Amino acid sequence: MSWLARLFGTSGADRKSAPPAPTAEIEHHGFIIRAEPYKAEDGQFQTAGTILKEIDGEERRHQFVRADRFPTIESATEMALQKGRQIVEQQGERMFSPGRN
């Protein structure tokens, strides 16, 4: 464990060892948006999610993490769904283009 992790009482393993947060899922313009917030080092919940779509018989996925943090998992979940809708509106299937995550 690095001295910084000891100083702040966290390590990179904390995120991996924490149980995953419950997910919420919606359909938006043919895409599935799955909210996947996780507990951050400061005890708040980080906005994150996955956007899925089947294209030519293959499931494609785009994962996103945003800097937004919230005190409750419900708030982080709602923001993840909102950000997912925004990504779909702005990028559509282009988010799955080669060279993009």
Image: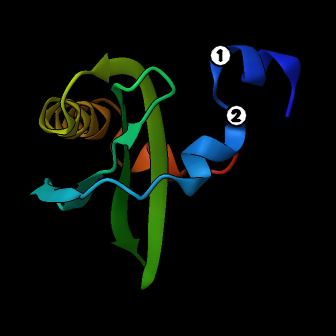
86 displayed left or right of 14 = left
Instruction: In the rendered structure, find residue 80 and report the number of the disc placed on it.
Output: none
30 displayed left or right of 1 = left
Look at the picture and state if 57 lies above or below 75.
below
Look at the picture and state if 10 lies above or below 101.
above
Q: Quadrant of residue 82?
A: top left
Q: Secondary structure at mark 2?
A: loop
Q: Position of residue 99 (x, y in %)?
A: 70, 44
49 displayed left or right of 62 = left
Q: Position of residue 96 (x, y in %)?
A: 51, 52
Q: Quadrant of residue 77?
A: top left
Q: Is residue 80 visible?
A: yes
Q: Nearer the viewer, residue 74 or 90?
A: 74
Q: Position of residue 91 (x, y in %)?
A: 37, 36
Q: Residue furthest bottom?
A: 57
Look at the picture and state if 73 lies above or below 35.
above
Amino acid under label 2? Ser
Q: Residue furthest right?
A: 2
Q: Label 2: which residue?
A: 11
Query: Where, quadrant-wise, is the N terminus in this rendering?
Result: top right
Q: Nearer the viewer, residue 72 or 56?
A: 72
Q: Label 1: which residue?
A: 8
Mark 1 and mark 2: span between their CA atoms? 9 Å
Amino acid under label 1? Phe
Q: Position of residue 2 (x, y in %)?
A: 87, 26
